[in-house]
Amino acid sequence: MCLAIPARVVEINDNDQAIVDLGGVRKDVSLALVEDVAIGDFVIIHVGYALTRLDPEEAEKTLALMAEAGLMSEAL
């Protein structure tokens, strides 16, 4: 089973790299597979790669469900 998690882009760096935030946890990820990502966008993250951009409303719903299920300490 694979798990992909929505996260908000907080910084974009050189070489298709970015920093994303998920409930206060920040992680370096690759943007090599996604075009036109901007700070504030939500992306789906899997094993260190952003796979696609996600509608902000859908990201918030998913994060709220994950928090409700106890998979996260709190939703964004």
Image: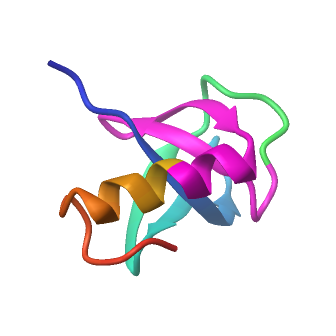
Residue 39 placement (x, y as % from top left):
77, 63
Residue 64 placement (x, y as % from top left):
45, 61
- Say if residue 18 shows up in the picture: no
Left or right, 5 with reference to 76: left
Q: How is the image coloured?
A: rainbow
Residue 15 placement (x, y as % from top left):
63, 43
Magenta span includes 45: yes
Instruction: Kindly identify the residue that appears in the image at 45 percent across and 57 percent down.
Output: 63
Q: What segment carries the magenta color?
A: 38-61
- Image height of 5 relative to 23, above or below: above
Instruction: Kindly identify the residue that appears in the image at 39 percent across and 53 percent down.
Output: 65
- Indicate the quadrant where residue 25 lies: bottom left
Magenta span includes 40: yes
Left or right, 11 with reference to 62: right
- Say if residue 55 shows up in the picture: yes
Q: How many marks?
A: 0
Left or right, 75 with reference to 71: right
- Image height of 56 relative to 34, above or below: below
Residue 3 placement (x, y as % from top left):
27, 32
- Image height of 74 relative to 60, above or below: below
**Residue 36 vs residue 58, the one in the foreground:** 58
Instruction: Kindly identify the residue that appears in the image at 32 percent across and 65 percent down.
Output: 67
- Image height of 67 relative to 16, above or below: below
Instruction: Kindly identify the residue that appears in the image at 61 percent across and 29 percent down.
Output: 32
> Which quadrant holds the N terminus?
top left
**Residue 71 vs residue 46, the one in the foreground:** 71
